[in-house]
Image (cartoon, helix red, strand yellow):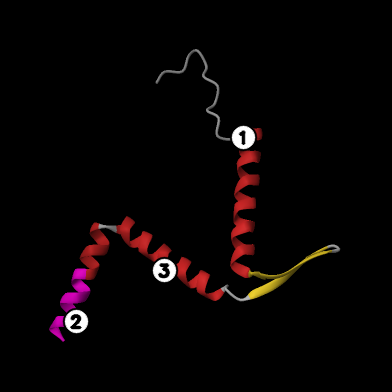
Amino acid sequence: MANDRSFFRQLLDWLQRKPGRALFWLGILLLAVIVLQNLEPTSLKILFWQVAQVPKLVLLLGAMVLGALIWEVLRRRTGRNAPPPRRPHDRY
């Protein structure tokens, strides 16, 4: 029983010292679960066009890449990340 407590204590100490690494490994674990759950093939119908037997994972990755590209294009066109114009009386 004391061995279990020391293991959990070490684990908590590691989590406190390296939260970024813990989040990285949690993300890897979640990615592995998503990949393993979405390997079965499925068909995709868009209007009159049909793609048969494409793995769901390919569709998910394609949708994420397309969404990221659209996000980046819109961000660049609207200039949302541009710094505000500097006024002459502003001091930094």
Magenta segment main secondary structure: helix
User: 22 and 51: which one is in front?
Assistant: 51
Depth check, front residue: 4 or 87: 4
The nearer-to-camera label among 3 and 1 is 3
Q: Give the residue displayed 64% in from the left and 57% down from the top.
A: 63
Please, what secondary structure does the residue beneath circle 3 have? helix
The circle drawn on residue 29 is 3
Q: Is residue 43 left or right of residue 64?
A: right
Q: Which residue is mark 2?
A: 4
Q: Look at the image and give the residue range highlighted in magenta.
A: 1-10
Question: Which residue reaches farthest right?
Answer: 48
Q: Work out whether mark 1 precedes mark 2 in sequence or the reverse, and give the earlier one.
A: 2
Instruction: Look at the numbered discs 1 and 2 and tell me whether their residues touch, using CB distance below 8 Å.
Output: no
Measured as percent of width and height from the top left, residue 47 is found at 84, 62
* Amino acid type, label 2: Asp
Q: Secondary structure at mark 1?
A: helix
The answer for how far apart the CA atoms under marks 2 and 3 are is 23 Å
Quadrant housing the C terminus: top left
